Amino acid sequence: MRSVSGKGQKKTGPRRGRPPGSTSDQTRRRILQAACECFGARGYESTTNRDIADRAGLTAAAIYQYFDSKLVLYTEAAREAQREIVPLFEQAIAGQPSARAALSALTRAYATAYERFPRSTPFLSGIAVEMHRHPEVAGVVLGEPNPVLQMIVDIVERGVDEGEIPRGEASAVVSMYLASTMGFSLQAALTGAAGLAEAVEAFVRLLDGNLFAAPREKAKPAGRKTKKAG
């Protein structure tokens, strides 16, 4: 039997690209999940296609087989993140008896989403900042449906219709809630799940009117005695 030597043979390292047996849809989803993680951690400008490819176990060239540009990939990653989170939010608010109860349930769902979808939540929370920094991102994102924003608007409109919220305050309530949820994301980044849960529960108590107790009555200072003229 003739032995085969390694002489003249080209040694190759591990192949990167679509894994054997994986489908195009599976590979595409791996890229989107990696993109959510990278964009959420590093932001739009600092994230490169190579970063995403390395996280997904692919070559940078392979990314372009599925997405024409980083901006297209960013937009598709946002859609992917929403597909994960929106059903959780919808389930949380379903059947709530009032707008106040729905906003409280939605607030608690933010904490659940942070634990259940650690890739998607930081990414979605940072989109508003990226829109401010990059007009090209704003131009694309503003043309996309925003199911979470629409959910909040619908809850507030329900509150208006049922007399819970004055109509003139509807826009302010939506803005307040959006600002609060962006703050939750920052709190989560700084303190983790425990700090987020604490902030969420305090905000729910605020919505329910249970955060502040009635102030104690202060003892009245004793008045000065005046001498009677004699």
Image (spheres, grey):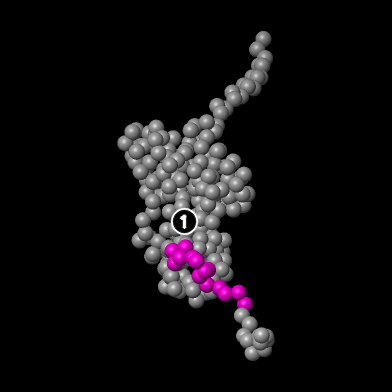
Magenta segment, which residues?
A: 13-26
Residue that sits furthest to the front in the current view: 1
Residue 29 point in image, percent of width and height: 47, 62
Report the residue at 44% width, 67% height from top: 24
Residue 176 point in image, percent of width and height: 45, 45
Report the residue at 58% width, 50% height from top: 188
What number of labels is visible? 1
Q: Which residue is mark 1?
A: 81
In the rendered image, the quadrant that contains the N terminus is bottom right
Q: Is residue 16 magenta?
A: yes
Around disc 1, counting alpha carbons within 10 Å, would you say few (fewer than 14), some (14 to 19), or many (20 or more)? many
Residue 171 point in image, percent of width and height: 38, 46
Closest to the observer, 17 or 160: 17
Closest to the observer, 101 or 215: 101
Element type at mark 1: helix
Report the residue at 51% width, 48% height from top: 113
Looking at the rendered structure, the kind of residue marked 1 is Ala
Please tell me whether the stretch drawn in magenta is mainly helix, strand or loop: loop
Residue that sits furthest to the bottom in the current view: 8
Report the residue at 39% width, 32% height from top: 97
In the rendered image, the quadrant that contains the C terminus is top right
Q: Is residue 171 magenta?
A: no
Would you say 160 lies left or right of 91 here? left
